[in-house]
Image (cartoon, rainbow, N blue to C red):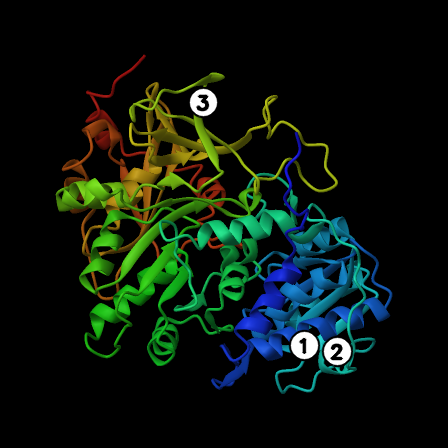
Amino acid sequence: MKSTMMPSPLLISSMLNRAGKLFPDVEIVSSRPDGSRHRYTNRDLHRRSRQLAAALQRAGLAKGDRVATLMWNCSEHLEAYFGVPESGGVVHTLSLRQHPDELAYIMNHAVDRFLIVEDVLLDVFERIRSRVSCERVLVVDRGSGRLPEGAESYEGFIAEPGEPIDPGLAEDDACAMCYTSGTTGRPKGVLYSHRAIALHSLAISLPDQIGISRLDTALPIVPMFHANAWGVPYAATMVGSKQVMPGRNLQPEALLDLIQDEQVTVIAGVPTIWLGALNALEREPGRWKLTEGLRVLVGGAAAPESMIRRLEKLGVRLIHGWGMTETAPVATVSTLKPEMGLWSDDERYALLARQGLPLPFIETRAVEDQVEVPWDGETAGELEVRGPWVAAGYYNSDQTEKWTADGWLRTGDVATIDSDGYIKITDRAKDLIKSGGEWISSVDLENTLVGHEAVREAAVIAVPHPKWQERPLAVVILKDGRTVEPSELRAFLAQTFAAWQLPDAFVFVTQLPYTSTGKVLKRKLRDDFADWQWDATVSAELTSQPTL
């Protein structure tokens, strides 16, 4: 028996129209390269997005054509988020942090027909221009006056008033496109449907998730070219939140000024951003007045328990999330169940450091040797997910091994699921360290290391060992002006880990290599230290190393 409900499609245009009609005077603030802030409203966003859609249609855009963007977080990027799907096209956000070879490959693989680029990023485009074919290049001018031969002004392109023609969209039509960061092989494209983005926006806005509402001022520090800024711009537009776009200046002091001046209440960003902000806040207490009830969504890499504690001391609530490009991207967040408010601080912080519970409509399971692992929180297995905003395949690819025969996405993350349903990512499958037949979690070691008062960042990798197969090596960045002996760090870790789990060596560096999405590039670290010579004295101490 069929229902009597209206067959109303879930479309991005509905979110834009709602913002323009119900919240027309809500501000959108964008930081500009010269330090100024551009202000306009949802009314302007609605009008200009539709003008962009109409202009693209006049330029010959066909339904499903890809329109690439090469921009920081700014109002014009937000216009593309909504205007391109309104035209029937697919907005394809390009990571400016990709190597030129990868960027050219991605644009050619996606068959990008149009490109919108900020003039401050024209140098990035020029490095690949001869290797890609875009019919129209639209330049967003930030005052440089640069207009490469064959390119045209974005403002001129959208200047003509007009309404877009209804492209006859269905909710399962593609509206956005992102590529994976390429940590394993070539970057792979994921096409998001209107329905997926709409449901994802509703889910992350729920009170037990991120709780984005019209009372909020939202600041997506995570780039809009990184998995759609975790969906925050879509959700904030949908519910009528004020939005603040940071532009390219992501230095801690500039971000904290922005947070204070605009009274930001919800922020999304990777842990490395928050490490810098925390250090600045603790270095100059009282300089910045943060909004009461400020909450931050942290993802992209595991948030250490020490970060949660430090933020809470400042009155900031950290919400730990997890997801992938393939999950649009938020799939889980860590928030407490009511009875957990009575737990001890140690129990509560340990739980909040987990990746949390799946969002509504997202299913998860941990699988080891093709058998689902019970929810006992002890045995780890590969995390698999499925749901209405989880990809069922990659764009223009025959790679199917990422999906199970019964339709689950293999994430490549090793996880446990406890009896309450909370997920803990113990490591990426490729980053686990197998020593003497036993597994060591690099993530657990890293999260504990950054809890040391002298440590700013840390990465732990597996390095070949003549006796134990692999041993952990810790690569550490110290806080400014701090020094520490490796023996002190070993002793610090020994409070939590068995002797055989401790890193055999500590290497102190000034920077770590990162992927285009802000994750530590462990593959490069493993290559850099592949010929590491172990200290025989230290290795000989590992007499308690269990073996199979």
Read off the residue under disc 2: 158
Looking at marks 1 and 2 on the same chain, the residue that comes earlier in the sequence is marked by: 1
Residue at 21%, 65% (x, y): give it: 314
- Quote the CA–CA distance across marks 3 and 2: 51 Å
At numbered mark 3, what does the secondary structure look like: helix, strand or loop?
Answer: strand
Q: In this image, 83 relative to 339: left or right? A: right
**Relative height, residue 45 to residue 222 (above, below):** below
User: Is the residue under label 1 in contact with that under label 3 (CB below 8 Å)?
Assistant: no
- Look at mark 3 in the image and give the residue it sits on: 367
| Mark whose residue sits in front, 3 or 1 | 1
Q: Is residue 313 visible?
A: yes
Spatial CA distance of label 1 from label 2 is 7 Å
The mark found on residue 296 in the picture is none
- Callout 1–callout 2 Cβ contact below 8 Å: yes
Q: Is residue 477 above or below residue 504?
A: below
Nearer to us: label 1 or label 2: 1
Q: Residue 317 falls in which quadrant of the image?
A: bottom left
User: Which circle's residue, 3 or 2, is located before the other in the chain?
Assistant: 2
Quickly name the residue at label 1: 48
| Residue closest to the eye, 443 or 170 | 170
Quarter of image, res 293? bottom left
Q: Which amino acid is tagged 1?
A: Arg
CA gap between label 3 and label 1 equals 48 Å
Neighbourhood count class around disc 3 (C-alpha, 10 Å): few under 14, some 14–19, many 20 upward: many
Q: Position of residue 96 (x, y in %)?
A: 60, 62
Number of residues whose C-alpha sits closer than 10 Å to that of mark 2, classed few (under 14), some (14–19) or many (20 or more): some
Q: What's under tag 3, amino acid-wise? A: Val
Q: Position of residue 180 (x, y in %)?
A: 59, 46
Q: Position of residue 84 (x, y in %)?
A: 71, 63
Q: Secondary structure at mark 1?
A: helix
